[in-house]
Image (cartoon, helix red, strand yellow):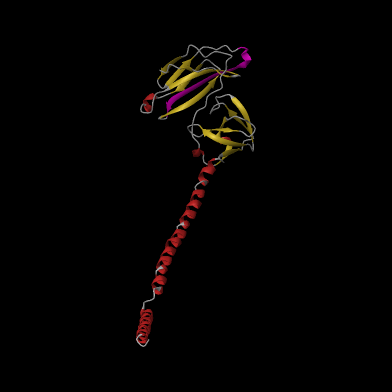
Amino acid sequence: MLRIKPLLIVLTTTGLFLSACDAAQAAFAPSPTPTETATPLPTSTATLTPTATATETLTPTLTLTVTETATITPTATLDVLHVIIDAERAFCRYGPGTAYLYSHELNAGDLVIIEGKNYAGTWLWGTPPDLERNCWFAASVGTMIGDVNDVNSFTTSLPRTTFVGPVTTVTATRDGNTVNITWNDINVQPPEDARGYLVEATVCQNGFLIPVAFHTDGLSMSIQDDPSACADQGVSSGVVYGVEKHGYTDPTPIPWP
């Protein structure tokens, strides 16, 4: 019994010593808490920067939208090009000139939407307010709202008749700068339906190759033409139409001298 006691004392002492060592190690061990807390802070700060940049890039997008809307304005002005008729009475015709048949009557205050013009802009092609088709009228009979340069120059086809055939036996001779043209009668029946003849030509006058149109009730016509002054612009030419109240015959070429 007396031999067991020292062993118990030793064990007890050893246990106390180990406990004291554990307590000392625990006291001097470094704490992980500061490291864990510091790590997410830079990450959180970095993610805020691109978000703010993305928000700023929205500003140019709004500016571009306003610019696109503004560019529509010039196009819209083309849609309002029109003429207000000033003359108490004016004629709208099937072609750009007094040589062509009457098509429709225009009156003071009529608003005509313009869609075309002749090469010189002296005759305009448009739709009167009470007509479902276009016709030609002199630019001088109204006031233009808009710029005539916004429409193209072009030619239109004439209404055709099936009641009579084309002009025959067309001849042409030259006397200096004068071209004399003759043809045969088309014998319109009944005679009261006859509306004479139309000559369309491209001739050189005053140094320019220009289109001209003439009407006559006879069987001949003389036209001025100086081809030497327009040699670099092209050649002169022409056709003859017979005319009756329903329209025009097919054109017959003039053998231009």
Q: Vertically, is 224 above or below 13?
A: above
Residue 15 in picture, x, y percent from top left? 37, 82
Above or below, 175 against 19 in this view is above
Q: Which quadrant holds residue 160?
A: top right
On whether residue 197 falls in the magenta region, the answer is yes
Vertical comparison of 192 with 114: above or below: above
For the C terminus, the image quarter is: top left
In x, y percent, where is residue 209?
A: 42, 28
Q: Residue furthest front?
A: 1
| Left or right placement of residue 253 versus residue 141 in this view | left
Q: Is residue 84 magenta?
A: no
The secondary structure that most of the magenta stretch takes on is: strand
Residue 189 in the image, given as x and y percentages of width and height: 61, 12
Q: In terms of depth relative to the viewer, which is nearer, 123 or 60?
A: 60
Residue extending furthest bottom? 2
Q: Is residue 6 above or below residue 139?
A: below
In front: 97, or 218?
A: 97
Residues in magenta, as a range? 189-205
Residue positioned 51% across, 49% down in the render = 69
On the image, the x and y values in percent for residue 70 come to 51, 49
- Which residue: 36% across, 81% down? 18
Residue at screen point 46% across, 21% down: 238
Horizontal placement of 51 versus 104: left or right? left
Q: Quadrant of the N terminus?
A: bottom left
